[in-house]
Image: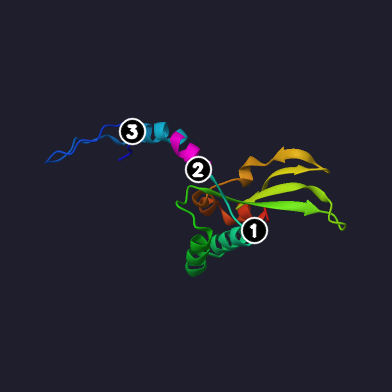
Amino acid sequence: EVILASDELVLQPGAGPAHAAADLRGRAKAAAPDQAARAAALVPLEMEVLEALRHAVEADDGKAFKEAVEQANMGTPHEVPMAERELRDDAGVSLGTEWHGLGGRFGWDTDAEGQGEEASSRCSLAEFAARPLAHCACHPI
């Protein structure tokens, strides 16, 4: 059953009314934008923690995944983990900043490239886990 924020919940004894599958699909589509807005909540992590999450999902390693999620302190799989990397030259002068997600670099503001975004690399843990592995490998962190 799909429950929307605008629904009023009432508990009554006995069986509830039956709903057709088409009704539930319609309610799920209506709820989708709200779910997407929640998924946009960025969770800042250290790059090492982000890499541990990515590698655990790609390796399908339950133990490593549990450890990485605990280290990341993520509340739900719908949050979007991200790490920030400052780019510097050999002299230590800042060349810009990159933002990485599970799918790879999703944003940048650098001297060489200017500002940009690759929205497909910004995804929640749940979205990343649902991707085919071949797609994920093309976005290394």
Residue at the disc numbered 3: 22
Name the quadrant of the N terminus.
top left
Q: Position of residue 8 (x, y in %)?
A: 26, 32
The amino acid type of the residue labelled 1 equals Met
Q: Earlier in the sequence, mark 3 or mark 2?
A: 3
Q: CA distance from mark 3 to mark 2?
A: 25 Å
The amino acid type of the residue labelled 3 equals Ala
Name the quadrant of the C terminus.
bottom right
38 left or right of 2 in image? right
Q: Which residues are magenta?
A: 34-41
In the image, farthest residue toward the right: 91
Q: Earlier in the sequence, mark 1 or mark 3?
A: 3
Q: CA distance from mark 2 to mark 1?
A: 20 Å
Residue at the disc numbered 1: 47
Q: Nearer the viewer, mark 1 or mark 3?
A: 1
Few, some or many residues within 10 Å of mark 2 (<14, 14–19, 20+):
many
Residue 39, numbered label: 2
Q: State whether the magenta stretch is mostly helix, strand or loop.
A: helix
Is 101 magenta? The answer is no
The colour scheme applied to this rendered structure is rainbow
- Residue drawn at 60 percent across, 58 percent down: 50
Few, some or many residues within 10 Å of mark 3 (<14, 14–19, 20+):
few
Secondary element type, mark 1: helix
Q: Quadrant of residue 26?
A: top left
The amino acid type of the residue labelled 2 equals Ala
Q: Nearer the viewer, mark 3 or mark 2?
A: 2
Q: Quadrant of residue 116?
A: top right
Q: Position of residue 42 (x, y in %)?
A: 56, 46
